[in-house]
Amino acid sequence: MAYIGTAYKGLQLQRTEGDASTVEGVLETALFRAGSILESNMGSLSKLGWSRSSRTDKGVHSVATVVACKLEIDVEDFQQDSEGLRLAQSINAHLPPEVRVLSVQRVNRSFNARNSCNSRTYHYYLPASIMGLRLDGSTEDAAVLERLQAALSLFVGTHPFHNFTQRRLYRPGAPGQKNKWRTRHPWKPAAAGSAAEGAGADDDDAPGGVREDEDAEEEEKEAPEDLKAPSSSEAGQPDGAAGLKAERRLRRSLTEPLDMSLRWLEERDLADPVSRGHSRILSIVEAASPAALLPGGPPCLQVTVEGTSFMLHQIRHMIGAAVLVARGQAPLAWLRAVLTQPARSHVPLAPPQVLVLADADFFPFRLSAPVAKLSGAALRLREGALLARHAFCKEVLYPALQPLLQDASWARWDATLSRVTHSAELEVHVLLSNILD
């Protein structure tokens, strides 16, 4: 399925927020109205064997989410329409235009969308203006783009990404334990300003509270508030206490410097451990040439990130770090350091509203399974669904992204990045000597 996440509090259903507040909420209602869910099963995703390939944050979009569930459908329909395009149309008749089912395909009984997903691909649309690109063919532009690509290439392979997420969520056995070093840090932690889309443990949480997907918008308790990116919803003029808080943030954004506060652990810190749960494998991290999504639109760079799984906010922190290096505000050596286990550093968090789940790859079905004859060797979008996705991107996604690329939150994030200062070069050399040793 495909959707624009701007108006929703993430993908995952939240009964306390109302069914219409999440993408899964409106999908469940549409399935019921289309006659695909019994009234007795309505309101209980567990009865439907519901699973999802990935969860997305508040404001994040997708053209590749897979939801698996048990539906009231005549299986004979798949003999003539194995892609389930007519079934998709019947469901789409009850969905808002920003949410579309691209295809309905048969899977086996044991299929779990998250566990069966082999890799996920995200696109992040980065405004050229945030890096000061003039797009005039100048040597200055070439240097910026070269630094960006060099930074992105460092993420490829297997690395500990503990500095690119909330570390406590990925420690086995104690996901809610506070980080003592962070609480001793002079920066005062604060809420990120976005509601959690799935704060409790569910089927997207691995044992021990380890999250495995680019996930819910939660309180960013391990990063100083000033390093967080304001979302598009924060760009207005809030009232009351929220307004005073926003005003104080704006005043700070014009005055106080932000030290990267990179430090190196000479020995293992039991209060701040980094384990295998913090490592991820990325196969592709690269940026395309700057171009407008639509004629006359602002130029942007499509950053492609492909990996087996992602941690909370990992991609947005990766973008933040790469932009910092591209702008010349941090050396490449700093980024190499923060991708090693002993290093601890705050990393800027890029805005969420231009992040798109672009593709998903699935493990093959057993060839003996009947579904393999209808859905192919592995679950994938085929001709009809690919055309539907292309149309959604052209007619819905790109027009929705265009104003978000010019959102006021980018100017605020630019002001935040402009305040970042880096540790002395001597500190970097010390870190590198530790790495080489």
Image: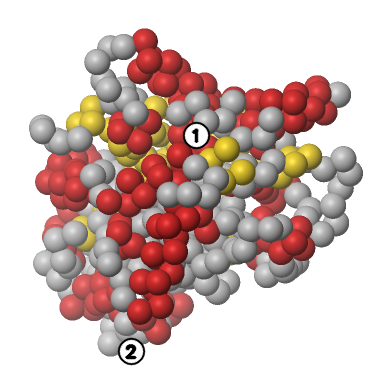
Label 1 neighbour load within 10 Å: few <14, some 14-19, many 20+: many
Left/right placement of residue 409 relative to residue 279 reads left
Marks 2/1 in contact by CB < 8 Å: the verdict is no
Q: Position of residue 220 (x, y in %)?
A: 55, 61
Image quarter hosting the C terminus: top right
Report the residue that reaches farthest toward the front: 255
Residue at 33%, 89% (x, y): give it. 40
Q: Which residue is mark 2?
A: 40
User: Could one spot residue 97 in this view of the protein?
Assistant: yes
Q: Is residue 370 visible?
A: no
107 over 284 or under it: above or below: below
- Mark 1: secondary structure: helix
Taking 212 as reference, is 397 left or right? left
Kind of residue at badge 1: Leu
The spot of residue 200 in percent (x, y) is: 55, 74
The residue labelled by disc 1 is 324
- Closest to the observer, 378 or 134: 134
Q: Quadrant of residue 389?
A: top left
The residue at the point 52 percent across, 21 percent down is 150
Q: Is residue 221 left or right of residue 357?
A: right
Disc 2 residue type (three-letter):
Ser
Residue at 20 percent of width and 31 percent of height = 292
Count numbered badges in the picture. Answer: 2
For the N terminus, the quadrant is: bottom left
Residue sitting nearer the eye, 403 or 46: 403
Element under disc 2: loop
In the depicted structure, whether residue 216 falls above or below residue 430? below
Residue 404 in percent (x, y) is at 25, 49
Q: Residue at x 40, y 84 (%)?
A: 16
Front-most of 211 and 274?
Answer: 274
Residue 32 place in picture, x, y as percent: 23, 78
